[in-house]
Image (cartoon, rainbow, N blue to C red):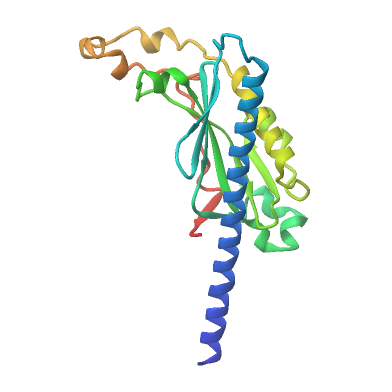
Amino acid sequence: MSQPDSELFDILRKKSRLKQDVYQITFSTFRLFKSVILEMVAEYQEKYNGNQQLIPFEYRDRGEFELELRFGGDVLIFMMHTNIFEFSRMHEVMKTTYINEDKDRSYCGVINIYNFLADSFRYNRINDVGYMIGRVFVNKDSHYFIEGKREIGMLFNNFSTSTINRESARQIVESSVLYTINFDLLTPPYEQVKEVTVFEMQASLENMKLKTGKRLGFRFQADHEEFKSEDR
């Protein structure tokens, strides 16, 4: 075997091993979120045991890479991406000493956190919109940071020192719930909803075309230019 081939295979093995390690750590983090949420649900049920629970706080299983937390009139969905990502050179993270000391630290798994209205699922309002309120990045060292809305993104943005563990996972879930509670449903502008077609009016409630969202017309979306996907 020639020397160039040997180097190529070594690079292949090293890169693949790195991605597999990051994937496993991200998956462990996702399962940690699930464990924390189940713990919080049990605490809620114990606190209000014997009382009529008009306000739900419950976990729902959505498969291997998704989990759902319903509370009040809201739903939080935690969704783990199965690919590994690297940040672009222009991202602020790439300018930190933490990354410059070890470029492999820039490879991350991602767990997205979405907020929907519970009624959107209850009545199958397929045109309703949800919002990404945060995305959790986890690297090979189990360090993490969050890009997100308001206090979620501001509280958890020290990549070099923040390590994911049970305590930090609980803080992330609690902050997401608190942000969602304070993220109120606003009435859409009158001009946007003053007209409705006969078809829309005749349609069943489950399939109405009138969109409902906490901030109708605004979506918090991932910036696809910030990082590129890498296979795990």
Left or right: residue 82 compared with residue 206: right
Q: Nearer the viewer, residue 12 or 169?
A: 169
Left or right: residue 163 compared with residue 56: right
Image mark count: 0
Left or right: residue 47 compared with residue 73: right
Q: Is residue 197 above or below residue 62?
A: above
Q: Nearer the viewer, residue 196 or 164?
A: 164
Q: Is residue 214 above or below residue 10?
A: above
Q: Residue at x 78, y 48 (%)?
A: 161
Residue 188 x %, y % = 45, 12
Residue 179 x %, y % = 63, 24
Q: Residue at x 68, y 47 (%)?
A: 144
Residue furthest front as drawn: 50
Q: Is residue 187 above or below residue 161?
A: above
Q: Residue at x 31, y 9 (%)?
A: 195
Q: Nearer the viewer, residue 24 or 193?
A: 24
Residue 12 x %, y % = 53, 74
Q: Is residue 62 above or below residue 124?
A: below
Residue 168 x %, y % = 72, 39
Residue furthest bottom as drawn: 1
